[in-house]
């Protein structure tokens, strides 16, 4: 029984061996478009969070602080960070510690990047799954925020979607590293 009978292997072999560049290019375009859109949403969430914080700072000395400001800042802060995850990975704008990596050979670095992309894909799919399970639990229980009594499971589901988008970006990174490895062998 060859690897072509294992689900997913045919797609990966097709991407890596045959039509890799075209498929990866299409996936990158889709990913970049989606993640830019989410980045804009994250920027809007940041502006809303700043507005809430500023309004609360102005109103507090006047004796009427903004009710639920901490809750709202927390929700919009989570959205700001979550919505930027995928685009941050695409642009490599995250912090990286490469104290040891600078001493590795190029081949070792490619292997390490492939492994870390694979582990990242699996990890963020699991995170998205568990976050969505949590969102479903709080939705079924009818939980609301403490101060404002707003339903907050949509925020939780949004974080799960953002984790899936990050997994998608990491999958593209994985496919690119596998395709680069195959190109050297030919």
Image (tube, rainbow, N blue to C red):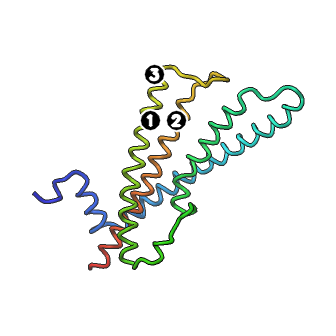
- Point out the tag, 1 or 3, that comes first from the N-terminus: 1
Mark identifier at residue 132: 1
Q: Residue at the location (42% across, 33% down)? A: 133
Quarter the C terminus occupies: bottom left
Q: Residue furthest right?
A: 62
Q: Residues within 10 Å of mark 2 (few under 14, many from 20)?
A: many
Q: Position of residue 113 (x, y in %)?
A: 40, 66
Q: Where does the N terminus fall, quadrant-wise?
A: bottom left
Does the CB distance between marks 2 and 1 fall below 8 Å?
Answer: yes
Q: Is residue 129 left or right of residue 76?
A: left
Q: Report the front residue among 142 and 19.
A: 142
Query: Is disc 1 placed on a helix, strand or loop?
Result: helix
Residue 47 vs 97, above or below: the answer is above
User: How far apart are the alpha carbons under marks 2 and 1?
Assistant: 7 Å
Please state if 115 lies on the left or on the right of 2 as rendered.
Answer: right
Q: Which mark is residue 140?
A: 3
Secondary structure under badge 2?
A: helix
Residue contact at pointers 1 and 3, CB within 8 angstroms: no
Report, in whole angstroms, how far the alpha carbon at label 2 lies from the one at label 3.
Answer: 13 Å
Per the model, the C-alpha gap separating discs 1 and 3 is 12 Å
Image-based side of 79 in relation to 174, left or right: right
* Residue 156 marker: 2
Identify the residue shown where x is 51% and y is 54%: 86
At horizontal 61% and vertical 25% (from top left) the residue drawn is: 145
Between 114 and 97, the one lying in front of the other is 97
Near mark 1 (Cα within 10 A), the count class, few <14, some 14-19 or many ≥20, is: many
């Amino acid at each position: 029984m060859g690897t072509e009978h294992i689900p997913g292997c045919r797609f990966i072999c097709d991407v890596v061996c045959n039509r890799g560049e075209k498929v990866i290019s299409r996936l990158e375009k889709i990913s970049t478009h989606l993640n830019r859109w989410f980045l804009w949403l994250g920027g809007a969430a940041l502006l809303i969070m700043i507005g809430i914080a500023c309004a609360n700072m102005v109103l507090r000395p006047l004796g009427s602080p903004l009710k639920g400001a901490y809750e709202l800042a927390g929700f919009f802060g989570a959205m700001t960070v979550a919505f930027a995850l995928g685009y941050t990975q695409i642009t490599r704008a995250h912090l990286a510690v490469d104290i040891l990596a600078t001493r590795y050979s190029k081949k070792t670095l490619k292997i390490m990047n492939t492994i870390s992309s694979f582990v990242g894909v699996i990890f963020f799919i699991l995170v998205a799954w568990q976050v969505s399970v949590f969102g479903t639990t709080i939705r079924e229980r009818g939980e609301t925020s403490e101060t404002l009594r707003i339903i907050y499971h949509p925020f939780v589901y949004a974080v799960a979607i953002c984790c899936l988008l990050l997994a998608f970006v990491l999958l593209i990174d994985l496919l690119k590293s596998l395709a680069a490895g195959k190109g050297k062998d030919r």
